[in-house]
Image (cartoon, rainbow, N blue to C red):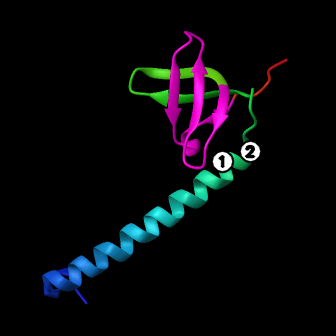
Amino acid sequence: MRLEDMSIEQLLEMNQIICERIDELRAKQDMQAIMKLRLGAKVHFNTPDGKVFGTLIKVNRKTVVVVSEDRRQWKVSPGLVKLVEDVS
């Protein structure tokens, strides 16, 4: 079936199904990310202004809290946070 042939009701139903699937995939991705994180871990994530480095201080179900090197606290999605690899 082509999108052009679908009614508004059909399109809205399809949209709801797609949004639910996206939410499921994001939740799964966040849970996998949380399982790799530990309090005190050195992490980084990207912002529009560049990469932020910091320490993980709290892990919630849907977010993590990071204290950056400039002592700012950031609440971000766990899927956006990456562990800093030890280069020693």
Residue in the foreground of this view, choosing between 52 and 67: 67
* Contact flag, marks 2 and 1 (Cβ < 8 Å): yes
Residue 21 location, x and y as percent?
Answer: 45, 70
Q: Which residue shows up at 37% across the image and 76% down it?
A: 17
Residue type beneath disc 1: Ala
**Is residue 64 a member of the stretch shown in magenta?**
yes
Neighbour class for label 2 at 10 Å: few (<14), some, many (≥20)?
few
**Is residue 87 a member of the stretch shown in magenta?**
no
The residue identified by callout 2 is: 36
Specify the quadrant of the image occupied by residue 57: top right
Residue type beneath disc 2: Lys
- In this rendering, the answer to whether 61 lies above or below 18 is above
- In this rendering, the answer to whether 27 lies above or below 48 is below
Q: Which residue shows up at 74% across the image and 32% down it?
A: 39
Residue 33 location, x and y as percent?
Answer: 66, 47
Residue 55 location, x and y as percent?
Answer: 67, 23
Q: Which residue shows up at 76% across the image and 36% down it?
A: 38
The residue identified by callout 1 is: 33
